[in-house]
Amino acid sequence: MKGAVLLKGENCYVKLGEFFLKMNNFQKEYNWFITDVECYPENKKYRQLLSNEYCFLTGEQLSQMIKKEDFQWIWGVFSGFDKNIKLDNILNYNLPYADGNENLWKTVNLQHPLANIEIVAWDSCLMLIKSVNTNIIDHFFDKFELAEDLSKYIN
């Protein structure tokens, strides 16, 4: 398990278009369970989808949404799952959240026990990324030079 935080050098910390591009579109390898969202897309369909308690998208669906409108995420948790894990199994656990979650700064663990990766939009001022696949985090450090090891911020 490894984590990183990006809180310097970006105009907008969680706009996923550039992030996915720099990360070689790894999002397509997962299904995404998106929770605790605050964002303001112009597209009415996206506003409605993301105003629910959670949404569940394939990596391809998430990519298509971001391709159509690369809006800023103020709050949100993106939990990435192997494609064989069903939504019913995911819903057997508490919903991951960012706003008010002090545990994000106490451990470098994923909030959802079945997830492989977690991306957190934190109050539009930083991005956290954690993964059991340390290669993803290493690649993040390569592409975002001002990213720092999350363990430096763990209390």
Image (spheres, helix red, strand yellow):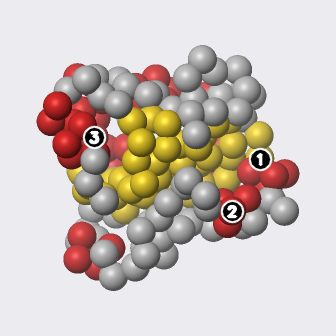
What's the CA distance linking mark 1 and mark 2? 18 Å
Looking at the rendering, which quadrant does residue 100 occupy? bottom right
Q: Nearer the viewer, residue 39 or 105?
A: 39
Type of amino acid under label 2? Glu
Image spot of residue 35 (x, y percent): 39, 56
What's the CA distance linking mark 1 and mark 3? 27 Å
Q: Secondary structure at mark 2?
A: helix
Q: Quadrant of the C terminus?
A: bottom right
Q: Secondary structure at mark 3?
A: helix
The residue located at (47%, 64%) in the rendering is: 96
Q: Nearer the viewer, residue 128 or 132?
A: 128
Q: Nearer the viewer, residue 24 or 62?
A: 62
Judged by depth in the image, the label closer to the viewer, 2 or 3, is 2
Type of amino acid under label 3? Leu
Disc 2: which residue: 102
What's the CA distance linking mark 2 and mark 3? 27 Å
Label number found at residue 62: 3
